[in-house]
Amino acid sequence: MLPLPLVSIPISYLLARLLRLPATAAVLTVISLKWAVPLFFVADYAVGSFLLGAVSPPLLPADIGWFMHSLLTIKAAGTPFLVGAAVNAIAVWLFTYTCIRKLLTLEQQRLLAGPKSPPVSRAVEEGS
């Protein structure tokens, strides 16, 4: 999911088409997970700050305006955010890979066991 406002939907559509994946699924995923993007940012920054030590943004003068203040705060959060994003991405990938591999192994074992014959009732056995 791309956290780019107004651009993420067309990019996800084009990327899905390029990779020959269902474009509708890609677009719906981006739309449905928009609410989670701020949570991902906070989690990335928190994990990165924890791993790098408590990194606090520098004190900024109050008279620079809210836009410049926001940009400088985001810039100061760069390294902890990137470290946290990498760690979180690896953790989610490992969890997803492990779960899918376990499900595929269970399905493979079920298929290799073959079809089970239905149980024969006692009434059928006694009647013969």
Image (cartoon, rainbow, N blue to C red):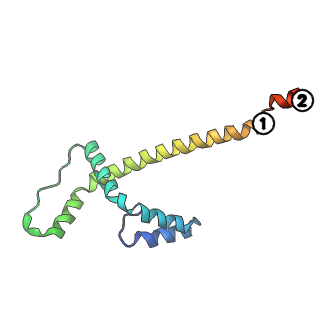
Q: Position of residue 128 (x, y in %)?
A: 92, 29
Front-lying residue, 82 or 21: 21
Q: Which of marks 1 and 2 is in front?
A: 2
Mark closer to the chain start, 1 or 2? 1
Q: Nearer the viewer, residue 119 or 45?
A: 119
Q: In this view, does 118 lie to the left or right of 126?
A: left
Is 70 situated above or below 122? below
* Amino acid on which disc 1 is placed: Pro
Residue 82 x %, y % = 32, 54
Q: Looking at the rendering, which quadrant does residue 6 occupy?
A: bottom left
Q: Where is residue 61 in the image (x, y as percent from the top left)?
A: 8, 63
| Structural crowding at the residue carrying mark 2, measured as other residues with C-alpha within 10 Å and reported as few (<14), some (14–19) or many (≥20) | few
Question: The residue under label 2 is which amino acid type?
Answer: Gly
Is residue 58 left or right of 25 when viewed as pictured? left
Q: In this view, does 92 lie to the left or right of 47?
A: right
Q: Is 83 or 36 nearer to us in this picture? A: 36
- In the picture of the structure, the residue carrying the numbered disc 2 is 127
- The residue furthest right is 128
Left or right of residue 38: residue 96: right
> Where in the figure is residue 52, as x and y percent of width and height?
26, 44
How many other residues sit within 10 Å of disc 1, few (<14), some (14-19) or many (≥20)?
A: few
Disc 1 to disc 2, C-alpha distance: 18 Å
- Give the residue at mark 1: 118
Contact? badges 1 and 2 (CB < 8 Å):
no
Q: Residue at x 81, y 28 (%)?
A: 122
| Image quadrant where one finds the N terminus | bottom left
